[in-house]
Image (cartoon, rainbow, N blue to C red):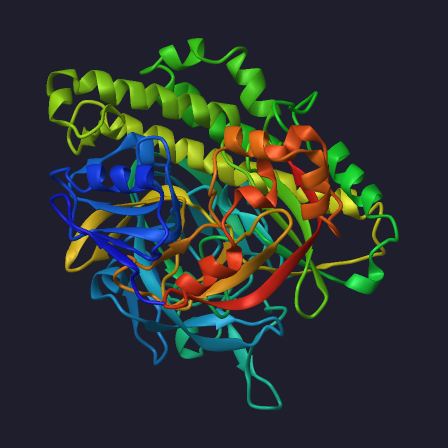
Amino acid sequence: MPIGLVLNKGKVPVKIYTKEVESHALDQLASISKLPFIHSHIAAMPDVHMGIGATIGSVIPTKGAIIPAAVGVDIGCFVGETEIPLFGGTQATLKELAEQGGEHWIYSIDKKQKIVAAKATANLTRKNASLVKIILDNDAKILCTPDHRFMLRDGKWCEAKDLQAKTSLMPFNGCIDESGCWIVKQPIAVQPRPPNKKLQNHSGSLAYGYNHQVESVEFLEQKEDVYCLTVPKYENFALSAGVFVHNCGMNATRLSIKAKDLPDSLKKVRLAIEEAVPVGFAMHKSIQAKNSTIIALNKVLEEQILPKHPAIIKMMKNIYRTWTQQLGSLGGGNHFIEVCLDENQDVWIMLHSGSRGIGNVMGRYFIGLAKKDMEQHITQLPHKDLAYFTEGAKYFNDYVEAVHWAQEYALFNRKEMMSLIIESLRKVFKPFEVTKETINCHHNYVAVEEHFGEQVFLTRKGAIRAGEGELGIIPGSMGAKSYIVRGKGDPDSFCSCSHGAGRKMSRTAAKKQFNHRDMEAQTQGVECRKDKGVVDEIPGAYKSIDEVMQNQSDLVEAVHTLKQVVCVKG
C-alpha cells in the first residue's frame, strides 16, 4: 500500500503509511516536523502512535543534531579501511563501498562450506566506536568493535572480545571439489611461508605457513567510525585478512524440531523459561553473564561514562550489582519471550527486550541534560521533550558514547537471555539444534545513513531498518501472529518498516475496558499468564497486525508467518 496521509504543518512534510492515526500522534508528528534540522521529510510507519517526545513508529532524519527522547543506537563493525575481497579478483575498503552505495558482489560461505558470490550493501553504522585489534598468524591486523562475530573453524561463532590465542578461524582459503565447487580447504597443511608473501586467497591461491589462528586480542584506547556489510542471503562475508565474519544483527532463532515434537504440557515450557529468566523488576541472584562481557562493559562504563557524569550513579541503587545481575533478564512492559510455529510447523524462539534499568537511567539523565542545556532556547521548541544536542555541543559526544554503551548492553542482554532460554528448553524438549538465526532487530536507535543525497543521523523510534533484501522481525500482539520479513528498500520510508502492531489504546484504558476473562478469550491456544496483571498487554489493546502488514506491503514482504504457542510477558 502506498503512503496513506501526508501532513504539511512544519518545515518538512510527514509521510504516513496509514490513514488511521490518533490526533495526539498527529500533533506530535507536526511538532517534530517544525524542528530546523529535519532533512527531507519524516516517515511514520503503519503502527504509529503517541510516544514520549517523539512519536512511536516514526523515522526522523536530522542534520547535525540528535533528539535524546527519540534515540537508542545501532551496533557497529569494522573500521573504514578494512579491505573486502570482491568477486572477480579486486578488493575495496568498507568505507569505499559505503561511499559508492548500491550493491556489491562479495564472497560468503554457505552451510556446506562452499565459497559463493553474494550481494551485499555497505553502510556507516556508528561514529567514534570503541575498538579491539585482532592479530592473526598471517600478520593480518583486524580492527573492529568488541561485539563483532567471527566464524570459527568448526562453523560456530565467537565475538571478537572472546577470541583466545590459538583459536582457529574459518579460512577464506579454498580448493575445487569433484563437482567443480570452490570449498573451504580443511584442514590447512602448515608449510613454510615465503618471506613477504602477501595473502591472495580471494583470487584462489592457497595460504602459506599459517593456520588462520588468532595470535592476540587487544582492547584499544582509540576510537573510529565503523562500517559493516549487510548480506541478506548468507549473513556472513570474507575479509581480505583471510577469514569469514558475521554481518550485523540476529536474534529470533529457529530450532530443528517440529510442532509434533512439542510436549503435551506447554505450561511446563513456560514455567521452565520463567525459572531461567527473571521477568519484570526481578534480576538474577548472582551474575550469569560471561566474565568477558562484564569486563568489556565495565571498562567503558567505569573509565569513560561515570567519571564525567557521576549523577548517573545516584539515580540507580547499587548500580554495579544491578546492571550486572540484570544481564539476561526480560524486564517489563511489552517485553516478551515466545515459542512460535511457522507455516512449515518449525519451532522458533523470539524475544524482545532492551537495556533494562541502566539504559532507562541513562536515557532519563541525558534527556534532562538536553532540556537543561536548552533552557535559554526552550521557548523556541514545539515541545520541551524535543530538546536536542547539536553536533559539536558540550554533551553531544558524551551522549552518543553513553547510548552506544546502552545499546551494546541491550544486545548482550538478549544474547544472554537466548542462551538461558535454549538451555531451559533442553530440559523439556526432545534433543534439538539451532538451525537458523534470523535477525537481532533494533527499533529505538540512531544510525548514520545516506538518504536523498545527504548523510544524516537517522532516528528510528519504534521502527526497524528494511533495506532491500534485509531481514527483520515484526511481532503482533500475544494472541495474534508475527512475521519474519524481507525489506524492499523503499526510499520514502528511509528503508524502514514498523516494529510491530502498535498500540491503539493506552495501558490505563486497556485495564479499564478489559478484564482477565477477556484475556482468556483473546489468548485461546496460547500458553501464557491470563491474570489481571497482564491485561494491559491484551491483544485488544493493539492494532490488527494484518492491517499493519497490508499497509506496509510496499516496504516489506513476508518470509515466515509465526504463530505464538507460548508467551512469557514481562
Residue found at x 11% / y 26%: 380
Estimate the x, y position of residue 108 in percent, counting from the top left. Answer: 48, 70
> Which quadrant: the C terminus?
top right
Left or right: residue 151 compared with residue 365: right
Residue found at x 30% / y 60%: 4
**For this rendering, which residue is in front, 270 or 379?**
379
> Which quadrant: the N terminus?
bottom left
Q: Look at the picture and state if 406 lies above or below 375.
A: below
User: Farthest residue in the front direction?
Assistant: 513
Decide if residue 325 is in sight here. yes
**For this rendering, which residue is in front, 13 or 448?**
13
**For this rendering, which residue is in front, 506 or 107?**
506
Estimate the x, y position of residue 504 in percent, counting from the top left. Answer: 46, 43
Estimate the x, y position of residue 519 in percent, counting from the top left. Answer: 68, 40
Q: Look at the picture and state if 180 lies above or below 87.
A: below
Q: Look at the picture and state if 250 lies above or below 507.
A: below
Decide if residue 164 is in sight here. no
Residue found at x 39% / y 78%: 203
Q: Look at the picture and state if 408 lies above or below 460.
A: above
Left or right: residue 241 compared with residue 525: left
User: Farthest residue in the right direction?
Assistant: 264
Estimate the x, y position of residue 111 in percent, counting from the top left. Answer: 61, 71
Residue found at x 32% / y 46%: 58
